[in-house]
Amino acid sequence: MRFPARSEPTVGRLIAEWRRARRMSQMELSGESGVSTRHLSFVESGRARPSRELVLRLSAALAVPRRDRNDLLLAAGFAPAYRETPIDAPEMAEVLRLVTMILGRHDPFPAVALDGRWDVLMANAAYAATVAACGPAARGDRPVPPLTLLPKPRPNLLRLLCHPDGVRNHLENWTEAALAVLGRVRREVGRDGDPSRRALLAEALAWPDVPPLPDLDAAGASDLVVPVVLRTPAGPLRFVSTIATLGTAQDITLQDLRIETFHPADAGTERAVRAMAQPS
């Protein structure tokens, strides 16, 4: 979560803003963190300077994302606890090799690697073909070579999904699929509150004919799994997707990394895709 910029924010004020964002009282945060309400009040008001351990303990109790925990530590005068390495840094070569292997082995079915802003980092041949079928206004006027780390600016999943020139033109059940993806994104934004991610969601919802998301309190029961039904010359192909993360990642960039793989939802789809992938 990024709060409005002010001059030299104090760690106490930032902690108080996170507490209010989580709708917690000082007493509730005290119980979650094991810090007395008196000391917590002193920290928030600036009358007491928290230790590094206390900042991390309060951050954990408030479920502050690790990138923002670094901001709290810096405001308290401490070095960041979590590193954030650019995905194209030399240190990431082994990770990119692993991602390339995972995506490549999933062909002929679509697979994609996304960052925390839902930008496409890398795609296999099947997913790259779907992106290439979108107009340049949706995907960016650049080629999408398979199994290659894409340079910035990268195609964004929300734009690909919601732009009038995007993948909506190739999905039989676009409205249903869009609601499922945007609902998931809204839940993610609600957890971290990052304004750049919130702005991307608002942009996606503002495109013509994008269905409004139902009110969280009013939303009724939904399907357990929403398939993606792709329109092709061979007829509609039905897929379900799974999202994987690196469970032992020790870097913020890697913790944000997600790999989405699409699997045939029925035997007919699997046969059709494998047949289309055969060399002519």
Image: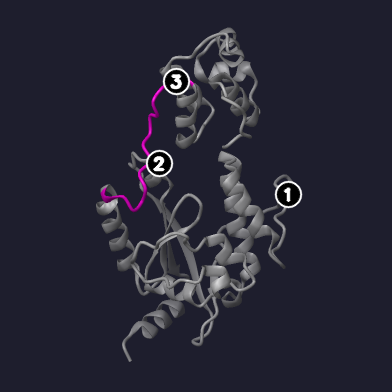
Percent across and percent down for residue 173 are 62, 72
- The amino acid sitting under disc 1 is Asp
Between disc 1 and disc 3, whose residue precedes?
Answer: 3
Percent across and percent down for residue 26 are 62, 17
Q: Is residue 232 magenta?
A: no
Q: What span is colored magenta in the figure?
A: 76-90
Residues under labels 3 and 2: Cα distance?
20 Å
Please determine whether, in this image, residue 116 is positioned above or below residue 99.
Answer: above
Please determine whether, in this image, residue 7 is positioned above or below residue 263.
Answer: above
Secondary structure beneath dot 3 equals: loop
Percent across and percent down for residue 245 are 39, 49
Mark 2 or 1: the one toward you: 2
Residue 252 tag number: 2
From the image, give the main secondary structure of the stretch colored magenta.
loop
Secondary structure beneath dot 2 equals: helix
- The amino acid sitting under disc 2 is Ile
In the picture, which quadrant includes the N terminus? top right
Q: Is residue 83 magenta?
A: yes
Mark 1 or 3: the one toward you: 3
Colour pattern of the rendering: one colour
Reading the image, the residue beneath label 3 is 77
Reading the image, the residue beneath label 1 is 215
